[in-house]
Amino acid sequence: MAPSMGEVVNRSAVSRRTVGREVVDSWRLRRAEQVVLCAALGLVALWLPACGGDVPPYGPASSGAPGGITEDIVSLPEPRLRGPLSVEEALARRRSVREYADAPLTVDQLSQLLWSAQGITERRYGLRTAPSAGALYPLQVYVAVERVDGLRAGVYRYDPRRHGLELVLDRSVRRQLYRAALSQSALAGAPATLALAAVFARTTRKYGERGRRYVYMEVGHAAENVCLQAIALGLGTVVIGAFDDGSVRRTLGMRDDEEPLYLMPVGRLPSQ
Ligand SMILES: Cc1cc2nc3c(=O)[nH]c(=O)nc-3n(C[C@H](O)[C@H](O)[C@H](O)COP(=O)(O)O)c2cc1C
């Protein structure tokens, strides 16, 4: 028989009391654990300011250092998904820019540029901002940092999975890069230069010789993303294809199976 409204109210009152008692009992049981936890948290609170004082926010460091850095990976700020320009405005304004203001980039700007080139936008399959034949992702992005706030000059490798930077060379390579790119002045004045490289075998293993064509198409997609992202950030860039492959590879400490395809110096517009 269906319970009356009074019975329903009473049963629910009993179950509320029972549940309430269980909650109180389990809280009492866990009280000792909570005391231990509070003591531990207190110790951590005392320890943190003492060890974090002189660590730069994004500088490469040895493993376990605070400030978003682990195993020589510099964590980058999360990419922003909203900006001040429409895609149409960015397309209309895109122009090759070869001269830059004498000012550093911010790490937020660098993070955004790297993300636009090869950032992961879908976690399940690791799909990225730029399309890739067979989702094989043969591209590798490097950045030669000259002047970026909070980052030491050097060469870094972008890790899309962690949205972070792995230190490759701990020194400025601006002059060597300038010479490797046939003394093009854009490379001498840029606070940072992105280098898009490819491991062709990742794609040719599946698609044979035709895979080479796919890789060239992909680097175009990634580079155009960077061009448009730069404009949306009020920055200028140019795609550079005229350089000595071997010199660029050596200068940037690229791996043997990586071929440099594009250099993209980037900086603030001279008028800023
Ligand atoms: C494959 C390719 C290679 C290029 N290489 C260079 C280069 O080595 N140096 C350079 O200053 N510009 C280079 N550019 C940029 C072109 O000179 C530029 O896109 C063209 O002059 C049109 O101007 P815009 O980009 O302002 O529309 C290259 C462009 C492409 C597509």
Image: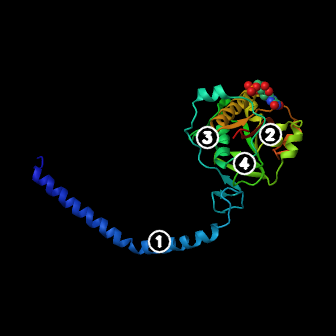
Q: Which residue is mark 2?
A: 258
* Mark 2: few/some/many CA within 10 Å (<14, 14-19, 20+): some
Left or right, 7 with reference to 173: left
Is ligand 1 within 8 Å of the beta carbon of the residue shown at mark 1? no
- Are the residues flagged by discs 1 and 2 in contact, CB closer than 8 Å? no
Label 3 Cα neighbours within 10 Å, binned few <14 / some 14-19 / many ≥20: many
Q: Amino acid at mark 1?
A: Leu
First of labels 3, 2 by sequence position: 3
SS class of the residue under badge 1? helix
> Disc 4 marks which residue?
104
Which quadrant would residue 81 be assigned to in this image?
top right
Separation (CA) of disc 3 from disc 2: 20 Å
Q: Are marks 4 and 2 in contact (CB under 8 Å)?
A: no
* Amino acid type, mark 2: Glu
Residue in the image at 31% along x and 65% along y: 23
Who comes first in sequence, dot 4 or dot 2? 4
Q: Quadrant of ligand 1?
A: top right
Residue beneath the point at 38% across and 73% down: 31
Callout 4 crowding tier (Cα within 10 Å): few <14, some 14–19, many ≥20:
some
Which residue is at the front of the view, 191 or 251? 191
Residue 67 place in picture, x, y as percent: 63, 59
Residue 85 appears in the figure:
yes
